[in-house]
Structures are given as structure tokens and as C-alpha cells.
Amino acid sequence: MGKILVTGGAGYVGTLLIPKLLGNGYKVTLFDRFMWGFKPILHFASNDNLKIIKGDVRDKNLIAEEVKKHDIILHLAAIVGYPACAADPNRAETTNVSGTRNICDAISNNQKLIFASTGSTYGKVNGICAEKTPINPLSLYGKTKWEAEKIVLEKGGVGLRFATVFGISPRLRLDLLINDFVYQAYIINK
Ligand SMILES: NC(=O)c1ccc[n+]([C@@H]2O[C@H](COP(=O)([O-])OP(=O)(O)OC[C@H]3O[C@@H](n4cnc5c(N)ncnc54)[C@H](O)[C@@H]3O)[C@@H](O)[C@H]2O)c1
């Protein structure tokens, strides 16, 4: 099985994805700056096939060194969502765009790159949103993710434009629309 580098692996998506990758026999490196702490990864942190690196994708040399050691790069690390990006636009830009560029600069043709893009790249859509729906990001989050996706696509990588995810994760996000509805309903009915 191949070696996979998961940036942002300590987040909402990564903490569910990595145990599945390990369960399927992959060797995984989790690369994250741990904005949400270490607790969300404790249930799989001792796995022999897992290496953990506390690092920042904006550190060009460090991320380049790690990219080179892996067959597949799953790039999840980002400042996620409109409020978090608006709170610190420079951090959003440097993380989401420059961080992605650092990965793309280091990758070679025989490596695979999968990028967690977002449905926020489409902006406001009337009717059904499909892959060919024109891109028109409205928020800084959507704009930085679209800039990053273009860099990934130019390098021959894949961009997956997730819709808003929902449900439980070790790094629980209650800022996600459906999770917020459920949380509000629970609190109001308590
Ligand atoms: N959750 C969703 O509904 C959703 C929807 C669409 C797209 N996405 C995309 O999926 C990816 C994962 O989202 P999530 O919901 O798990 O978010 P999250 O905030 O829970 O996880 C992001 C992770 O990235 C890490 N990170 C942030 N800046 C970093 C940096 N400079 N260097 C290294 N690590 C850094 C954080 O510490 C965090 O663990 C993101 O790229 C996001 O844009 C998520």
C-alpha cells in the first residue's frame, strides 16, 4: 500500500478519514498545526502506521520535505469557512493559497494530489449546482479555495468540491449549517 500525507489531518474531516485509511492498510503521515488541539486524534495516535508532524503548510521547506516522501497527498489543511477567513484575511490567504502552492511546487508527476475544495467556490446558485456550474465565489473563503484549486488543477491534481458536511466528528464543528440546526434544536428543546 502507498504512503499518504494528510495535511489538516487533525480537523473535522481528517480525524474521521485517517482511521479509515489506516484500517485499509495505508501508512499515513498526519501533518497539522493543531489549531484545535491534540485531543481529536488521541484515539488513533498510537497506530504503528501513523506518523504525526506538528507543522505549518506555509513553511515551504518543511512541507516540501514531507511531500517528497509520499505517494499520495490529501490536502485538507485550510482556514475553513467565511467567519474564520474574514477574522484574519492574511492568515486565510497565506494558508489556503500559499500553503497549497507550497505543496504543488514540491510535488512531482508520479505523485497523486487530492485537494479538499468546496462548494463555496460556486457562490449563489439558482437551481441545481453541478460540476459545470460557473464558479463565482462570494466570500474570501470561497475565493481563496478557488485560487488554490486552480493551482492544484494546473499541477494535474484533483479538486473535490465538498458540500457542507454534517454529523459527529472527534473535532466537532458546530459552525456547519446542519450541525448548527441540530445543536440549536437540542438546546432550545432542553
Ligand atoms: N467540513 C465541511 O463541511 C467542508 C466543506 C467543504 C470543504 N471542506 C474542506 O475540507 C477541508 C477540511 O475541513 P474541516 O471541516 O476538517 O476543517 P477543520 O478546521 O476542522 O480542519 C482544518 C485543519 O487544518 C489545520 N490547519 C489550518 N491551517 C494550517 C496550516 N497553516 N498548516 C497546517 N495545518 C493547518 C487545522 O489545524 C485543522 O486541523 C478544508 O480544506 C475545507 O476547506 C470542508
Image (tube, rainbow, N blue to C red):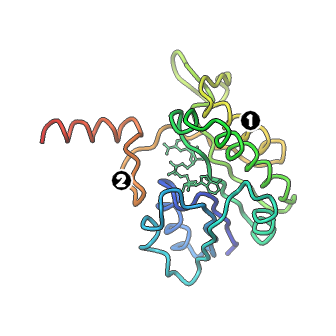
Name the residue carrying label 1.
147
Q: Is residue 127 left or right of residue 116?
A: left
Q: Residue at x 42, y 67 (%)?
A: 39
What SS does tag 1 mark? helix
Q: Residue at x 27, y 41 (%)?
A: 183
Q: Nearer the viewer, residue 117 or 140?
A: 140
Q: Residue at x 49, y 76 (%)?
A: 45
The amino acid type of the residue labelled 1 equals Glu
**55 is higher (above) or lower (below) than 25:** above
Is the residue marked by circle 2 packed among few (<14), some (14-19), or many (20+) residues within 10 Å?
A: few
Q: Quadrant of residue 132?
A: top right
Q: Nearer the viewer, residue 169 or 42?
A: 42
Q: Are marks 1 and 2 in contact (CB under 8 Å)?
A: no
Q: Nearer the viewer, residue 92 or 103?
A: 92
Q: Is residue 189 left or right of residue 11?
A: left
What SS does tag 2 mark? loop
Q: Residue at x 54, y 61 (%)?
A: 34
Q: Which label belongs to residue 97?
A: none
Q: Earlier in the sequence, mark 1 or mark 2?
A: 1
Residue 154, horizontal then vertical, whole percent: 84, 42
Residue 29, horizontal then vertical, whole percent: 64, 71
The amino acid type of the residue labelled 2 equals Ile
Name the residue carrying label 2.
168
Q: Nearer the viewer, residue 132 or 18?
A: 18
The residue most toward the left is 190
